[in-house]
Image (cartoon, rainbow, N blue to C red):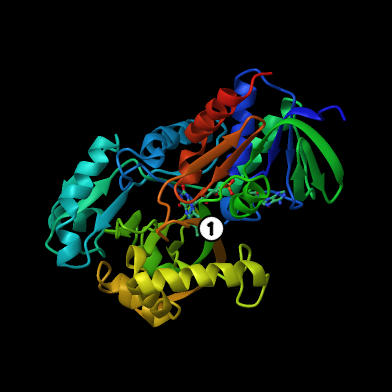
Amino acid sequence: MRPTADFIILGAGIIGLTVARELLLRGHKNILILEKESSLGAHASGRNSGVLHAGIYYANDSMKAKHCNIGMNLMKDFVRRKNLPLLETGKVICAGNEVEANQIISLHERAEINGALTKIIDSQELSELEPLAKSYGGKAIFSPATAVVQPLSILEALKNELFANGIQINFNSEIQRIKQNILFTNRGKISFSHLINCCGTGALKIAHSVGLGHSYRMLPFKGMYWVLDRNTSARISRAIYPVPNLKLPFLGVHVTKTLDGNAKLGPSALPAFGPENYSLFSNISFCTSVGAFTTLGKMYLKNQNHIREHIASEISKLTKEGIVKELRTILPTLQAKNISKHPQVGIRPQLVRTKDLSLEMDFQIESNQHQTHVLNSISPAFTCSMSLAKSIVDHTFRNFTL
Ligand SMILES: Cc1cc2nc3c(=O)[nH]c(=O)nc-3n(C[C@H](O)[C@H](O)[C@H](O)COP(=O)(O)OP(=O)(O)OC[C@H]3O[C@@H](n4cnc5c(N)ncnc54)[C@H](O)[C@@H]3O)c2cc1C
């Protein structure tokens, strides 16, 4: 069978689309993208907070740190060039207690090394920027570069750019298995020279089927949101984040001013019953759940990554009162009557290392001669994507020449 295209990209989320664009920028046009859904943004890339992160939190030697600030700037340029919505109001990071207050300085130092411009502000400056926010001990961090975008408009603009250059996306094409250089899909067989797996929550299963990614299991984490009523959201001007627990890959429940003038609260981060278990009883995957909850049970016994405290705090956030209690440490006037459930739910394809049951904090790229697999594409992969795509393509060419 002759290869259908030089490069087959699996998944048309932000990673698949930006990888295709990067290949195009390097002069490759013979690319085919396969996507199981009928439209863009059905999963994480269309269900996130839409925040372009400046690169504050990430370990200095990580891929996240390497790509976040550069990726943010590349994405901002793209958004401006395409005249897409962009809210450039920055964000404040506030401490909710003494432990968090003690981390403000080290977080600021980490940000500096990562190239993220931030400033330590006092309570007076904080109340000028965000009158409703409070930070324990008085000091907070201001990140002027953090911005908010509309993820779906970016996916759509990328698709249009790819289409204009003759690159096709085959929607409704689900990859079922791979044997040597043949892909078996619900619409028949396709042969490939090189494939790049960008399937988000589906990526590890595909990698496992070809003998890669075996040092990981996937533990999907669900993120749910709430929305502030209009009167209160009108008094919020920018994103307000807590100081996160840096042992976890989640940033904590925050407030994001959205482009439609609302303010979203969330996302939570509770283990889900499957990679697409968006509502309580939908898409429950028995196999994933048994494997994931067995892994979670073992992590719980070891209290790996402080998972016991994390789960207890996430369970309390299932109610309005729980979310409000958590956020009141940095937004003291918030009341349960001012918030309501937001319909958006997203799921993170969080990997756990099988060796020691720790949560993988960074992106992972694994490859063999004809395949590249992008794993653990968790936050801030949306922000990083245009820079990360360069590393993914570099990685691909290390093993493969046309
Ligand atoms: C709640 C939440 C909030 C977040 N907030 C932010 C944020 O504010 N800023 C930020 O930078 N990042 C954020 N992220 C992270 C970001 O959204 C993701 O890291 C990013 O979207 C991952 O992109 P992706 O292309 O890897 O995955 P996806 O968007 O999931 O795309 C993968 C695609 O592959 C397809 N696919 C899967 N399996 C198959 C198969 N077998 N065959 C064919 N196609 C398949 C899927 O249909 C999907 O379209 C957030 C994530 C979540 C869940």
Numbered marks: total:
1
Q: Is residue 280 visible?
A: yes
Horizontal and vertical percent for residue 72? Answer: 43, 37
Viewport quadrant of the N terminus:
top right
- On the picture, is 222 further left or further right than 122? right
Q: Counting other residues with Cα less than 10 Å from the Cα at mark 1, is it few (<14), some (14-19), or many (20 or more)?
A: many
Task: Residue under label 1, please give it.
Answer: 217
Horizontal and vertical percent for residue 102? Answer: 14, 58
374, 76: nearer the viewer: 374
- Up-down: is 71 above or below 174? above
Viewport quadrant of the C terminus:
top right
Question: Residue at point 52% right, 48% down?
Answer: 377
Question: Residue at point 35% right, 42% down?
Answer: 55
327, 193: nearer the viewer: 193
Question: Residue at point 60% right, 55% down?
Answer: 201
Q: Is residue 157 visible?
A: no
